[in-house]
Image (cartoon, helix red, strand yellow):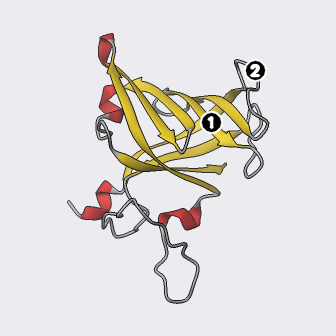
Amino acid sequence: MSSSAKVTLFEDIFEVTALNPDGKKFDAVNRIAATGTTYECDLLLDMNCQIYSVKDGEKITFVLASTLNLDGTPDDHFSYASTGHDDKEPSLADTYEYVMHGRIFEITYKKDGVVVIAASFGGLLMRLTGDQRHLGSILPDMRLYVLVKKN
C-alpha cells in the first residue's frame, strides 16, 4: 500500500437537508445538516457563509484528509503555504472550493457500531455520525482537513 492511500480518511457525497437547523447563531456562519448518499452518515458542519455558501437541497462532496500533499507525505499541521505558484507542488486543496484545518476532539462509540466524531476547525464545529466501518481511520486528537466542493 502506498502512502497516498492514507491521504483521504473519508469521502462521500452529502445532500444538504437543512440550513441552520437550530436557528442562525452567528452572522458569518451557517450550520449545515446533511446526509451521505453512499454511507448514509449524518453530518453537521459549520461553514463561513461569507466565504462559501451552500443551499438546502444541494449536494456536496465532503472529504476528510490527513494531508494536502498528493503523494501522502504528512503535513506539519502548524503552517500552510498556499499552492498555485510555479515553485510549489499541486495539492489536494486545488480541486476543492472550501478547505478547513482542524482537530478531532471527541469520538463516541454508540451501540450497533455507530460512531460520532466531533472536530473543531478554528471554532467552526463538525459532527459526523455513521458506521464505524467507514470512519475507523479517524482517530482521537487527530489533526485533519475538511475539503468541500459542490456537485
| Residue found at x 61% / y 29% | 34
> Of 105 and 56, which appears nearest the observer?
105
Residue at the (45%, 36%) spot, across then down: 119
> Which residue is at a point 57% across and 67% down the rendered structure image?
94
For the residue pair 83 and 26, the one nearer the viewer reads as 26
- The relative height of residue 72 versus residue 141 in the rendered view (above or below) is below
Q: Is residue 58 left or right of residue 136?
A: right
Residue that numbered label 2 is attached to: 23
SS at circle 1: strand
Q: Residue 9: x percent and y percent?
A: 37, 47
Please, what secondary structure does the residue beneath circle 2 have? loop
Splitting the image into 4 quarters, where does residue 133 fall? top left
Which residue is label 1 attached to? 46
Q: Which mark is residue 64?
A: none
Q: Residue at x 33, y 14 (%)?
A: 110
The location of residue 59, given as percent across then percent down, is 67, 40
Residue 16 pos. (x, y %): 67, 32
